[in-house]
Image: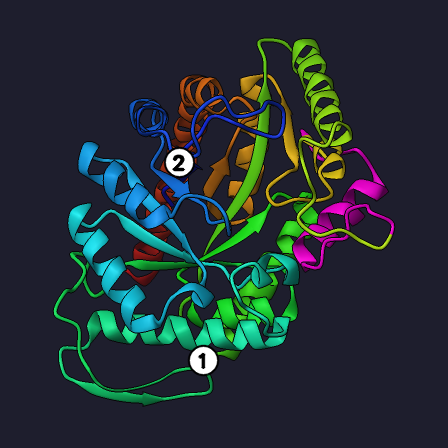
Amino acid sequence: MPVEFLGIAATGDGSETSPRTTAAFDRDYTLRLARAHEEHGWDRVLFAYGSGSPDPAPAAAFLASKLDTLQILLAHRPNVSYPTFAAKTFATLDQISDGRLTVHFITGGSDQEQGREGDFLTKDQRYARTREYIALVKKIWTTRERFDHEGEYYRFQDFVSDVFPVQQPRPDVSFGGSSDAAYAAGGAEADIYCLWGEPLARTAEQIERVRQAAKDAGRTDTPRIQVAFRPIIAPTEELAWEKAHRTVDLIKARIGGGELLPRAKGADGGWAPQNTGSQRLLEIAAAGERYDRALWTPTAAATGGAGNSNALVGTPETVAQALLDYYDLGVDILSARGYHLLDDAIDFGRYVIPIVREEVAKRDAAKAAARERDRHQLIALQA
């Protein structure tokens, strides 16, 4: 199967290791970073969502109008707009990008973050709302006749859109989460299911949960699987590990100095993530620092399991082989984001992506040859 690479479409140059030197939305930096991805073998970039961050939809439209091939993964929270409005926004962006849009729906794992924009539903209610929302967006994208809807969270009458996606029948829908409610919602509605980087054995378990959830929802297909990492690469193993330890020291220094604030604080003032995915990352980090070929957890531990935060450390060859281990599990979208966004996107594109693509091509050729041998053997037996 083909492999795809997802990078980040940041609108400013800050990261966990360095403060931002640009504006929150810097046109030149946004375009320069995206061009670095397009020119170095990446397939798409993610426009993330935060309560106080620049709106990702117009930022994505700006990028789509400037670049020719780079695809867009647009993060969206259902609490910020009605599904009729959102579906039109997405369809318009798919038109602007000439069919390069995928939408990533975020249910929201922090009550504090959701409350910043007036969302006070419980976690289970948010998942139920997201499931209804995604189903409605899909229907609006593909329905040419007026229809009414009366559901648990949304009600409208006599609606039909006048703008439809370029992609037919519709753009793909991306979804993530590690709770039972997430597996149920994503298994039912997602074309792509997104996971954070965990040890191989635990990732395999999650993939099976997603496949079972899809089956339980009555699907005959299963979502594609995406897994996200923070690669830390250098020309030698020794240099890579030195770089990794410097990275963690910088993260801790910024947190200790108050420059990085946790998204959700516990009673003791420390990190207290509510979402299952972050809790899993902290559990894995508490059990050990190194897993499998190159997975390293101190970056996740330092940030309190904040989002995509487990690292892959080593030479480009080591990190590429580690990514191939996940590919062999059934992961065909590999998400990667370094700590120096621009330089790391270029280095990863130059030194890691070509190795992975070459090895995937060899695997696919071997599988095709094996299938052809099996076919000839079957014909011979039937003769």
The image quadrant that residue 357 belongs to is top left
- Residue at numbered disc 2: 9
**Which segment did they paint magenta?**
268-294
- As helix, strand or loop, the secondary structure at mark 1 comes to loop
Q: Nearer the viewer, residue 36 or 222?
A: 36
Above or below, comparing residue 339 to residue 143 in the picture: above
Left or right of residue 230: residue 257 = right
Residue found 28% across the figure and 72% down from its top? 84
Q: Which quadrant: the N terminus?
A: top left
Q: Nearer the viewer, residue 47 or 285?
A: 47
Residue 239 counted in the magenta span: no
Left or right of residue 365: residue 320 = right
Residue found 45% across the figure and 80% down from its top? 218
Q: Report crowding for label 2: few under 14, some 14 to 19, many 20 or more residues within 10 A (C-alpha).
A: many
Q: Quote the CA–CA distance across marks 1 and 2.
A: 35 Å
Sooner in the amino-acid sequence: mark 1 or mark 2: 2
Query: Viewer-nearest of labels 1 and 2?
Result: 2
The image quadrant that residue 323 belongs to is top right
Above or below, comparing residue 58 to residue 299 in the picture: below
- As helix, strand or loop, the secondary structure at mark 2 comes to loop
Residue 59 in view, yes or no: yes
Residue found 46% across the figure and 17% down from its top? 343
Residue found 57% across the figure and 27% down from its top? 231
Q: Nearer the viewer, residue 83 or 327?
A: 83
Where is residue 21 drawn, in percent x and y?
49, 21
Left or right of residue 24: residue 121 = right
- Residue at numbered disc 1: 218
Which amino acid, by three-letter code, is at mark 2?
Answer: Ala
Which amino acid, by three-letter code, is at mark 1?
Answer: Gly
Above or below, comparing residue 167 to residue 120 in the picture: above
